[in-house]
Amino acid sequence: MRWTHWVNFPILTIMIWSGMLIYWASDTYSITLFGHTYFKFFPQGFYKTFNIPKRLSEGMAFHFLFMWAFALNGVVYVLYTIISGAWRELVPQRKSFKEAWQVLLHDLHIRKMAPPQNKYNAAQRIAYTAIILMGFGSLVTGLAIYKPVQFSTVVWLCGGYHFARILHFALTIGYVFFFLIHIIQVILAGWNNFRSVISGFEVVNSAPKKLTVPAEDGK
């Protein structure tokens, strides 16, 4: 599970970067009301800051190549969680949505007591399950955009080509927010927690035990 977790990070980074190269060729999304554009994804200054030129063919080449690595890594992860039974610790329970709110209040230091948890708390169960569904959604909408004629049925299930593109874009924004929140949570949890994610074990500092010497008679 750790391998698929860490392998997915550079793959997803390349996918987002190459997706930006593709998107810049037709950056049409914006928040417009009554003919006035209030926000545009993304402002021109964004492209200048990160030096993203119009390299459509290069972006498509990287995107469609690493798409297969992203898909295979996801399949390995899902199959392992099913076969090993780890899915029982990841899938939200009936009480998870209520406890997730309590976890949020605890993280915001509004609630003192954190709800009981096993390997993952309720908020983690919901987030990790959601990210798997998001990955599946990215693959489906990506295929609809990649081959709209060959996968016409998939395009229809996505609500059409343009809506599939909007969903694909929205899922990408969701990955970015998930990543930022994920990193903040790891930092708040402390270095020992981050080390355990990499190594698979947690270092616990315990005080040395005091040696007790049996007392002599009368002493």
Image: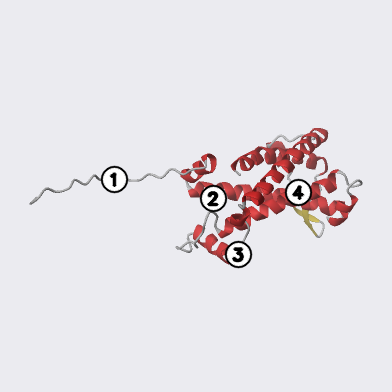
- Mark 3: secondary structure: helix
Mark 1, other Cα within 10 Å: few <14 / some 14–19 / many ≥20:
few
N-terminal label among 1 and 4:
4
Name the residue tied to disc 2. 185
Could you tell me residue 217's position as x and y percent? 9, 50
N-terminal label among 2 and 4:
4
Name the residue tied to disc 3. 97
In this rendered view, identify the residue nearer to me: 57 or 123.
123
Tell me if residue 176 can be seen. Answer: yes
Q: Which mark is residue 209?
A: 1
| Residue type at numbered disc 2 | Gln
N-terminal label among 2 and 3:
3
Tell me if residue 169 can be seen. Answer: no
Whether residue 156 sits left or right of residue 167 in the image: it is right
Whether residue 9 sits left or right of residue 138 in the image: it is left
N-terminal label among 1 and 3:
3
Q: Quadrant of residue 18?
A: top right
In front: label 2 or label 1: 1
Considering every residue shown, the one lying at the far right of the view is 149
Q: Quadrant of residue 159?
A: bottom right
Residue that appears at 62% across and 47% down = 179
Compute the Cα span from label 2 to label 4. 24 Å
| Residue type at numbered disc 1 | Lys
Name the residue tied to disc 4. 138
